[in-house]
Structures are given as C-alpha cells and as structure tokens.
Image (cartoon, rainbow, N blue to C red):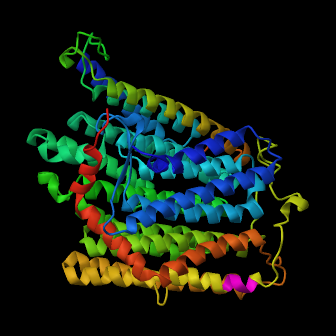
C-alpha cells in the first residue's frame, strides 16, 4: 500500500455515499447548493472512472487493481477489484449519471423530495456492485442500488408511477431472495464467497456435490437474468421505465446492464475453461435466452406507441444482444461489450429526448388522489416551478437530429458506433460458423430492422406530425446539455472506434484468462 | 431431529410465501414476501451446517475449528434480515400510496372486470 492512488478504488463508492448522507441534513430549499454538490461528486466519479479506464487501456500495464479493506488477505477479508471490465462499466455509469443529473437539474430535481441524495446513492450502489470482489457484498450493493431505484421510480409521483413501482419492487425483492438462496447454496458447497477464491475452488468440488453447486449458480443466474430483464423474466422493465421520470429512467438503463455485467463476470471467471467439469456451465442457456430476449424486445418496440416505451424495449434488446453473444469467442465478446456501451448511451439519451418531445401530452401526477399530500402532489402544477430554466430557441430543431443519432446507434446502422459493434459481432459469429451462431446473426439483423421501423415511425409522429393544439416544445439549456453529453459520448465512441475496440479486445482477452484475476486477488501481502 | 424441523420450517415458510406472493391483494403479497424472506434467512443459516451447542467465535487456547460453528452464515443472515426489513418498510409505504392513489388494494391498481 502506498500513497493516495491506492485508495482510488474507494472513491467511486465512498464519495457519493458521504455526499448523499450529508445532503440529507440540508434543507430541501437549498437546491443550488445540493445541485453543485452532486455535480461536483459526479465530476469526481467521472474523473476516477476515466483514470481507471486509461490505466486499463494500457496493454502492458497492470491489469487489475485490488484494494483490501482493512488490509486483510483476500479470501478472508473484503476486496474491491477494478479490472478492465469494471472500469469500462464504471466509465459508462459515470457518463450516463452525469448527463442524467444535468438533465434533471433543469426541471426534474424539483419534482419531489431528496432527489440528489437518492441519485447519488444509486450511483454508489452501481459503482459498488461493479467494484466488489465477493458475492455477498455484491448482494449488499445491489440492494443499495435497488433501494435507491425504488424511490427514484416513484420520483415525481402520480398514479402510473406508483402502480409501476409496486410491480417493480415486488419482482426485485423476489429476485433478491433468489440471489440470497443462490449465494447460500454456493457458500454451502464451496465455503467461500470471494469470487476469485470461488473460481480457484470450482474445479476441486467433489463430484457428488457438483450438482448442488450448479443449482446454486443457476439460482443466482435466474436472479441476474431477472435484473437484466431477459425473456421471460423481464416483463417488469417496460412499464417501469416508461412510467419513471426521464432522468431516472436514463440512469435505470444502467441497472439492467449491471445484471449483464455480473453474468459476464461470473461466467468468465467461475465457469471458465479452468473450472473442469463446470466449464461453460449454462452458456448455451444464456445464448438461447439472449436470442429470445432480442426477439421479444423487437416485438415490444414495434408495438410501442410512445417513444419512452420504445426506449425501454431498446434496453431489453441491448441486454439480450450481449447475452446472446456470451457463447461466442473473445472477438465476439469484445464486440458485444463495445455494442453494449454504445447502445446504453443511446438508450439513455432516447429516454431524455422522449421526455422533451412528449412533454405536455401526459398529465403528470394527480394531486387530488394522493395520500401524502406534501410529497405526492403534481410537481409541475406551480407554473413558476415548471420553468425549465434558460430556454434555447433553435434547440427543438436539434432534437430531431438527436433522435436520428439515437435511432442509428440503437439500430446499429452506419456510420455510428452501433454499426461498428454490430458488424464486429457478426464477423465474429460468421468466423465461428456454428448453427447457433447463425441464429444469433439472424436475431441481430431482425433487431436492427425492427429498431429502424419502430423508431422511424415514432420519430416521425413525435416531430413532424404535431397538432396545433399540442403545447410548444421547449428545451431547457440543462436538458440540452444532458442530451448533448450522451450523444457526444456516442459520437466520441464512433470517432475513436478503433481505440474503443482495442480496449474491449484487451478486456475480452483479460476475461479469457481468469488466472490473471485470481492471482491478482489471491496473492499479495496483507495481514 | 433438528434437521427435519428446520427443513420443514423452510419448506412451509417457502410454500406459504410463494402462494401469498401470487395472490392478487397487495397486503397478501407483502406478507408473502416476509414469509419468503424468513424461509430464505433460515436457509442461509442452515447452509453453515447445523451444530448444536457450538459457539461461533473462537477464544484463546481453543483454536480447533471443529469445536465451532461457522460464523459467516450468521453474519450473512444478520445483513439479510436488516436489508429485507428496511425494504419491507419501504414497500409498505408504496402499498399505502398505491391504495390512496388508485382506491384499490389490487396489485394492478384496479379490480378485475367480471
């Protein structure tokens, strides 16, 4: 352990936690202070994630940073691990979080109490889940993340949000119980919860206990498939994300990707080829579920009648695409990761754009029916509070362009990054050439076609076909900034596509060699 | 004997929990979730192997691990209890809000049409 840089891994968890706790002490009316504070925290998290990303991008560099809490040696103490995969997801979370926050500052943060604290706690939970090195802390961080998300789904109130929130909370509490059952079974068989230690012990499990280990892993897998909204476990996603307020939905898009992250992590680490009889356990199931998820998501997109709902199904399609690529080799996984980053940025941006375009069409909350009158009234009934701040006149025209960029990214059409990712995935699949690979290729093609049709139709309706009676479109400067930030990140990913793919190639290669992860965690001094 | 009692407890709690979870009223769902989480908590506890009369901590001079119960599942259960308790409380608030906003305690927010 030397100097401050070793403690860097604690930053993305500790900073939002401390800031959020401190904010609870501040009065609700001190909005400027709270906004500044959460912007500063997000900027710091973004900087830390960028630092880790740059470090991981160095091919020759040290590939996993390990932080031992209290300096206890790995299988006994708690560890945080940041490797290339975590850094990639951390950076994505930080970008989406910062842009969602900018968007919310214009209007949405005033729609309910304690928005900033909840938002930062959500970011803290996601970062913790991405960085933790053992299964039980993964559970704890998942719960932190979900608890904050339950409140954020209800942010802004209204009957539709409460109804959607009820279903969302029920399904996620049930999934958390499955998570616990899986963790308990795995602990019962292997007597460890540390992921690296688990990977080391997986080949040594006695044959008569192996089925129990597999049952545990499958239960855990079901929990994560529920969270990543895979078919047939993901029917909760579309109503919830459609009902949630736009900045919350944009950040919730990350949550489903955290489920995908854990599946990638577990299957590449614990069920690597080193795992003996457990190698590649459940891989074919993931691929089949992924293909079904893509098809379900495409049908949902085509059936959507509002942009926010289509965006929610785009999130489902993007999760499904990555799951379907899990059976592929390193090149396929690398392409899938590249696609995942691009499509998540675009989905989040689409939620924000949809909110601006469809604003005024829905009534918001119902103040006359609410139980807790002070907290659950219509947030925007007060005209003064309804002002989105500085309004930029020509921005409405820019929104059309932004929508096109989103559609191209999600559908994976040239010339943007979505196309690069999709092309790379198809190349890897063609090179492998098994019958299942062709099925995945077909699903990918169908998803592109469906996304173009659905988003094209909804885009035309939202921008060109507007009644005279509909309210004038207004875009606040902060809202535009949030959307532009997300699209800027997508465009950066396009322009520096080579560098991006090089990074995901390194990530896939690193994931293909789990011995590196295991040795960085398990060796090393400590108490 | 302990094993059978424990297994039965987990089984009954789990079965009742799942049944209640699938019922249409929000209050039934929340009781179902509570029962399920009790069942799961006992299950985690059982995964540390059942030992009667074995303390979970070591003392100086008695370092033989065979004398002790595994403390980790107990720590896990403690965390799981706290988390599920907090989230049940949160769920109760949402339940009340849903009852107030929709005027119905059906999970869909409206009575099914006959």
- x and y, in percent, of residue A373 in the image: 81, 43
- x and y, in percent, of residue B101 in the image: 72, 47
Q: Is residue A397 magenta?
A: yes
Q: Quadrant of residue A352?
A: bottom right
Which is nearer the eye, A70 or A217?
Answer: A70
Q: Is residue A476 magenta?
A: no
Which is nearer the eye, A70 or A249?
Answer: A70
Residue found at x 88% / y 57%:
A382
Which is nearer the eye, A52 or A221?
Answer: A52
Q: Characterize the magenta stretch by its predominant secondary structure.
A: helix
Q: Quadrant of residue A280?
A: bottom left
Residue found at x 19% / y 46%:
A200
Q: Quadrant of residue B9?
A: top left
Is residue A222 shown above or below A21? Answer: below
Is residue B4 shown above or below A16? Answer: above
- Apparent side of residue A265 relative to residue A159 in the rendered image (left or right): left
Residue found at x 74% / y 59%:
A108
- x and y, in percent, of residue A495 in the image: 49, 84
- x and y, in percent, of residue B77 in the image: 40, 28
Q: Residue B114, can we see it?
A: no
Is residue B70 shown above or below A155? Answer: above
Q: Residue furthest front?
A: A3
Quadrant, the N terminus of chain A: top left
Residue found at x 21% / y 43%:
A213
Quadrant, the C terminus of chain A: top left
Is residue A218 shown above or below A493? Answer: above
Q: Residue A175, can we see it?
A: yes
Range of residues picked out in magenta: A396-400
């Amino acid at each position: 352990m030397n100097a401050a840089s070793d403690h860097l891994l604690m930053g993305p968890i500790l900073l939002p936690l401390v800031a959020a706790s401190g904010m609870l002490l501040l009065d609700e009316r001190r909005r400027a202070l709270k906004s500044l504070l959460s912007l500063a925290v997000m900027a710091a998290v973004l900087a830390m994630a960028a630092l880790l990303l740059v470090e991981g991008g160095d091919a020759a560099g040290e590939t996993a940073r390990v932080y031992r809490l209290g300096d206890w040696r790995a299988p006994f103490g708690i560890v945080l691990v940041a490797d290339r995969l975590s850094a990639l997801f951390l950076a994505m979370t930080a970008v989406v979080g910062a842009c969602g926050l900018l968007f919310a500052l214009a209007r949405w943060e005033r729609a309910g109490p304690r928005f900033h604290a909840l938002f930062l706690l959500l970011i803290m939970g996601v970062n913790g889940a991405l960085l933790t090195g053992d299964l039980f802390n993964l559970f704890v961080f998942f719960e932190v993340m979900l608890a904050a998300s339950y409140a954020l789904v209800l942010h802004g109130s209204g009957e539709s949000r409460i109804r959607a929130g009820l279903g969302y909370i029920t399904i996620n509490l049930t999934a958390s119980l499955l998570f616990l059952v899986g963790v308990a079974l795995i602990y019962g068989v292997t007597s460890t919860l540390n992921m690296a230690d688990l990977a080391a012990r997986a080949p040594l499990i006695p044959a008569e206990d192996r089925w129990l280990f597999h049952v545990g892993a499958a239960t855990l897998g079901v929990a994560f498939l529920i969270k990543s909204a895979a078919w047939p476990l993901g029917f909760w996603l579309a109503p919830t994300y459609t009902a949630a307020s736009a900045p919350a939905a944009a950040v919730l898009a990350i949550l489903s990707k955290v489920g995908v992250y854990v599946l990638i992590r577990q299957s590449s680490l614990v069920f690597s080829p080193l795992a003996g009889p457990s190698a590649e356990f459940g891989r074919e199931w993931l691929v089949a579920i992924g293909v079904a998820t893509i098809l379900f998501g495409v049908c949902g997109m085509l059936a959507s009648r509002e942009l926010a709902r289509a965006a929610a199904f785009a999130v489902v399609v993007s999760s499904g695409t990555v799951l379907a690529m899990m059976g592929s080799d390193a090149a396929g996984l690398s392409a899938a990761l590249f696609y995942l980053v691009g499509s998540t940025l675009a989905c989040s941006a689409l939620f924000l754009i949809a909110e601006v375009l469809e604003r005024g069409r829905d009534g918001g909350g119902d103040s006359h029916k609410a139980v807790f009158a002070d907290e659950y009234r219509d947030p925007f009934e007060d005209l003064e509070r309804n002002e989105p701040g500085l309004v930029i006149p020509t921005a409405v025209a820019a929104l059309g362009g932004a929508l096109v960029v989103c559609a191209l990214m999600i559908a994976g059409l040239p010339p943007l990054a979505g196309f690069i990712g999709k092309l790379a995935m198809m190349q890897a699949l063609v090179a492998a050439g098994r019958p299942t690979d062709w099925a995945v290729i077909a699903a990918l093609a169908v998803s592109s076609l469906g996304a173009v049709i659905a988003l094209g139709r909804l885009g035309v309706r939202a921008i060109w076909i507007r009644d005279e009676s509909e309210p004038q479109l207004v875009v606040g400067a902060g809202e535009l900034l949030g959307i532009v930030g997300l699209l800027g990140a997508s465009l950066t990913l396009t322009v520096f596509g080579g560098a991006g793919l090089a990074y995901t190639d390194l990530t896939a290669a690193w994931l293909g060699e789990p011995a590196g992860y295991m040795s960085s965690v398990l060796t090393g001094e400590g108490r | 004997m302990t094993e059978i009692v424990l297994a039965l407890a987990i089984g009954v709690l789990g079965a009742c929990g799942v049944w209640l979870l699938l019922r249409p009223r929000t209050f039934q769902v929340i009781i179902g979730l509570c029962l399920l989480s009790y069942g799961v908590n006992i299950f985690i506890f059982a995964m540390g192997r059942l030992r009667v009369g074995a303390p979970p901590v070591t003392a100086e001079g008695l370092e033989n691990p065979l004398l002790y119960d595994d403390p980790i599942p107990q720590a896990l259960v403690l965390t799981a209890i706290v988390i599920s308790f907090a989230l049940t409380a949160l769920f109760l608030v949402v339940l009340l809000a849903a009852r107030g906003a929709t005027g119905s305690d059906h999970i869909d927010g409206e009575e099914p049409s006959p």
